[in-house]
Structure formats: C-alpha cells, structure tokens
Image (tube, grey):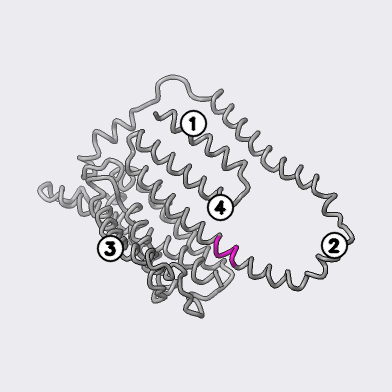
Amino acid sequence: MTYLMLLLALVCALIIIVEWRVYRMIIYFGIFSLIVSVGYLLLGAPDVAMAEAVTSAFSTIFFIVCIERYYNSEMVEEKHKSLQNSSLRNLTAMTGSDDEKSLPAAKKVKRVSWVFPLILAAAGFMVYILFIPQGEPAEFLKNLYLTRFMTDVGGENSITAIYLAYRVYDTLFEALILVISVVAVVHLSYFSGSAPDKKQRSEIQRSGMTAFTLRIICPVIFIFAVYLIANGHISAGGGFQGGLAVATFFICRYLIYGIYDMPVKVIVRLEEIIFIAIVAVAIFVVVLGIAAYIPDNIMPAYRIFYLIMMNILIGLKVACGFFVLFYRFITIERR
C-alpha cells in the first residue's frame, strides 16, 4: 500500500508538471498533499500526516481565493481596455495580423515548456532508482528515540517528544523561517498599510447557507484546535496542527462577519514575542538542562507542563503567522 501511495504521488507530480491551468494545478497540489499524508499515516507518523493534511487544506483554499481575487481584478481591467481598443481589434480583424503566423511558434514554446520538466523529472527518478542505498537501513537512532522518549521527555506521543526535545533546534529554525516569511510578506507587499481603507465584506456573506454552515463549524474548529494543542503530548496533534486550526477559526470568523478589528502590525509583533518566548523556554529547559535540578517526585508533572506550554506557544505562533498571510493578501492586497 505504501508503494501504491508513492506511485500515485509520482503520477500526480508529473500531472502538476505538465498542467498549465492555474486552478487545476492548485487542485492537483492539494491531491498530491493528500496522497502524501496518507503515505505518512501508513508509515506510522500520524502527527506528520495530520500536519500535511491541514496545511494542504489551508493552502489550497488560500491559493484559490487569492487567484480568484487576482482574476476578478484582471477582468475589470480587461473590460476597460477592451472598450478602448475595440477599434484597433476591428481593424486587425479586417486587415489581418501577424498573430496568426506566430501561432505555430507559440505552440512549440508551449510544448517545450512542459516537455523539459517532464524529462527532468524522469531523469531524477532514474537517478534515484540507480543510486538508492542498498541493504537494511540503520535503525539505531529510531530505536533510541522510541525506547527513551517517555523517560527523557515525558508524554506518550513520540513525535511531540522528538521535535520538542531531541530535535528542538530544528523546531526553532522552522519557527524562525515562519517569522521571516511573515515579516517579508508584510514589508514587501505593494501596500504599506496594516488595514484596508474601506470595509470590504466577503462575498461568502451573500450565501445564506454557506454563512450558516460556517457559523456552526467555527465553534467546532476552535474546540478541536484546543484539543490538538492540549493533548499533543499524549495523542496525535500538537502546536503546528492546532495553530492551523486556530488560524482557520479566525479566517472563518472574517468570512462570516467581515471583521477588521485585528491590525496586522499587532499580530506580527505578537508572533515575534511568542517566538522569543519559545526560544527562551527551549534554552532554559533543553540547553541549560534545568530538569537536572527538579525533584524526582514532581518530574512527571514538570515534563507534561513543558510539553503543553511549548505546544501552546507554537500553536499561537503558527496561528498568528498563517492569519497574517491570509489577512494580508485577502483584505489589504486585494485593493
């Protein structure tokens, strides 16, 4: 079954390479992420599978909304241009144009544009097949993590223990990348403001059934987010998955009510403060080894408190980052 998922992922990747329609490409990317998440689940990593699935759902919806806004604005501009250039188009239709002569060349360029990535993907696959490592994989580190994480870190979720203790430096750098991405989006955007000038409302509000459904889903999403964050140390979930769910809750809140009471600057600053708190807690607990000074009778409670606190901080940071990206593109840049 795992090899079937890998084969489907390869086929979907090739379809993405040869597809040139933007909307279809976004949908295929979502399908690719769904296939990959199933593969993670089959390989025994439910947390990674959940993170892949929620990130795929969020990014797919985000890209579709952004592309829709872009094409809507382009259609408005095209209508104005069509009125101004109608006489020129009529003249071109009567006298003929060189565009017809350039059609074969355009088809050749289009054919080359997808043939080259396809050949490159096939060559990469052949290199992978020829140079794949032979023999049994080394499982010493995996067995070490799985046998010692409950006594070294605590909790019952090995993935949470790994990324919050054994590989906490990777987690810090991933959090830093999200901070840098959000700051870059804010400072490199076309508009420098932190809120829209006009209270532009979401078109979803015009659909009564959609708004009613979102009003029912919103509380469920928030409760599920709290569950993912609070129980990430004992079950599948954690800060990254819960943070995406929190961001989804606030995005649904915006779609329903069109509320603009959250300045982007405040949320960006909050994300930076939370990141500093994550680094401080990680240094205090992991680097300085404060656990060595904790009495044995309260050590289990201390470990659970550390895991829950880190999951809460990471969840809030991820929620701030993804909400800023959505808010920035949908409410401010859409002007």
Q: Which amino acid does the dot numbered 3 rest on?
A: Pro
Q: How far apart are marks 3 and 4 (CA)?
A: 30 Å
Foreground mark, 1 or 2, reads 2
Verify CB contact (< 8 Å) between mark 3 and mark 2.
no
In this picture, which residue range is highlighted in magenta?
68-72
Badge 2: how crowded within 10 Å, few (<14), some, or many (20+)?
Answer: few
Q: Which residue is drawn at 21% across and 49% down?
A: 291
In-image side of 123 versus 234 (left or right): right
Is 69 magenta? The answer is yes
Q: How far apart are marks 3 and 2 (CA)?
A: 58 Å
Magenta: main secondary structure: helix
* 32 vs 293: above or below: above
Instruction: Give the image location of residue 95, x and y in percent.
Output: 89, 60
Look at mark 2 in the image and give the residue it sits on: 92
User: Residue 219 bears which disc, if any?
Assistant: 3
Foreground mark, 3 or 2, reads 2
User: Residue 23 bears which disc, if any?
Assistant: 4
Seen from the viewer's position, the closer of residues 293 and 153 is: 153
Badge 1: how crowded within 10 Å, few (<14), some, or many (20+)?
Answer: few
Which is nearer the N-term, disc 1 or disc 2? Answer: 1
